Image (cartoon, rainbow, N blue to C red):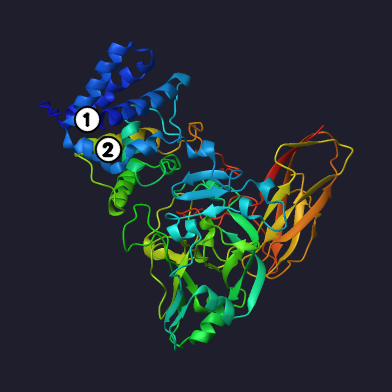
Amino acid sequence: MQSTYAPSADKIIGMVNGDWISQASQFRSMVPSRRRRFIAQLGVALGAPVVFADLLSQSGIFPRALAQSALEKGWPGKEELRLLSDRPLNAEAYATLLDDSITPNHRHFVRNNGLIPDRAKEGNLSDWSLRVDGEVQKVLDLDMAALKGSFKHVSSALVIECGGNGRAGFYPKVGGNPWTLGAVGCARYTGVRLRDVLRESGVRDSAVYLAYHAEDPTLNREPGKAPISRGVPIEKALDPHTLLAWEMNGVPLPPEHGFPLRLICPGWPGSTSGKWLKRLQVRDRVHDGPKMTGTSYRVPRHPVAPGEKVPEEDFEIIGAMPVKSLITRPAHLFQTLKAEPLEVGGHAWCGEGKVRKVDVTIDYGSTWQRAKLQAPVNPYAWQSWHCALQFPGKGYYEVWARATDEQGRHQPMVVPGWNPKGYLNNAMHRIAVRVI
Amino acid sequence: MRAILLSCLGGVLAVISVQGDEGSAARTPWGLVADPVAPLVVSTCGSCHSPYLITHHHRDRDAWEKTLLKMQKNGMKALPDSFQAKVLDYLVQYQGPLKEDRPSESPWAQAAFHANPLWE
């Protein structure tokens, strides 16, 4: 139907602000004839201005805007997690969900930068291979059978933690995913040592950095553009604990966790553990792919005041993560009877080396009790701890857990070093307990 | 086809406006304030990423302007100036910097809480 009515953009905005919306709120109570007139008015505005119609059709507003909030539905396979975003998918665990010594797949946090590749959603290995190239003697092109057949298999429990875990605790507020405490997990991964694959390829003396390239598309599916391509220094790549993994807790990597193959660089920010790998590039310089440059995963070289503006050249790339711990039982705001000792437990981990001890306080740090701490099942697994607490009387208490690493560095009591991107908040975990 | 599109849009607006009956800071499913400009913000920004990424952030005008530029680099279609102004005003009004005395207004805003205040 051809319309001769051609309102200007301003008129459209006027309708957005005025008549449309105020009438829409009464839409349900309108008599049918009034509804028909309302629809007609919408039609007039929609039909004529090419710009606005363009916006609506290009942006796909109708299917998406009508979609029920993903928060209400939950992400399939991750329904228990706190969903921060569904596009890209970002979801973290609540502390009590992480009580298991090995985090099951459905309780492991997810951090995506782009969309999940079709291959991962389909579980499809056809035409997939891992290329290893760059500063190497021999370029490798390994399909899954070659990868699995040529190198010794390894199975390890490894912690992956997002560099921004705890970001929501920083004040003033910073940009980025507002993780609280659950962007961490310790699953069992099966794969091969990256070192073995790199040795087969023959790393040249010129090698400085290892870069990963992956299959995930950008949010707007721009061809030839990657949402993320990071890496680690070649020494970390050659560390015997750095894995190329195809299995997570005994099953092939779930689609959101990087099928068919991912890197695990334990102890370093999760973004170094690239997912949906297609290529590993050994470079003769620090990698400069998306989310490797600028201020991504970087902190100021020297400590800054909260809210301070920092020039880009004064940032450095984050390496090993600091010592941290979680109280996974009981839940925050647990109630207990004075007479019973309360068992408190959780896990502790460190980016480099082991956790030496975990101490617990119920009087805001005035006195501390040593928790029983297990050794890690293998390097870079987290260490479970527990402690029986006796309270002096009824009332409201805070329980804090403080992990100390082998160098004697322990977690800070307050949120440490504000930085513009909100990384590395390893402050002690505090829960409240009521004794009745 | 257009009839379907029209009724869809009407449905969208009705859904958003129904939320408005529930309280003073009525919100759309993603936590955005249900202001008349909200559908424009959702359609502009939500075409690529979840509108949650807007409610996660509280920024001043300068920072939101920079964000819109960055989004254009990431593939957001350029809006007519008046639309752009509406979107920017919305962002500044409802997702502006958090203040000490301003209580948590959205599911993602953290109260301005200092565990250990620094006194002179």
Above or below A288: residue A119: above
Pinpoint residue A280: horizontal percent, then vertical percent: 45, 74
Q: Secondary structure at mark 2?
A: helix
Residue name at image x 22 percent, y 30 percent: A46
Name the residue carrying label 2. A56
Residue name at image x 30 percent, y 46 percent: B68
Pinpoint residue A219: horizontal percent, then vertical percent: 38, 52
Q: How many numbered callouts? A: 2
Q: Are marks 2 and 1 on the same chain?
A: yes
Q: Secondary structure at mark 1?
A: helix
Pinpoint residue A241: horizontal percent, then vertical percent: 62, 74
Looking at the image, the residue that sits furthest to the right is A339
Q: What's the distance in space between the residues labelled 2 and 1, CA to CA?
A: 9 Å
Which is nearer the N-term, disc 2 or disc 1? 1
User: In this orientation, which residue lies closer to the viewer: B120 or A358?
Assistant: A358
Within 10 Å of disc 2 (Cα), the crowding (few <14, some 14-19, many 20+) is some
Q: Do the CB atoms of the residues marked 2 and 1 lie less than 8 Å apart?
A: yes
**Which quarter of the figure is the C terminus of chain B placed in?**
top right
Name the residue carrying label 1. A46
The amino acid type found where label 1 is placed reads Leu
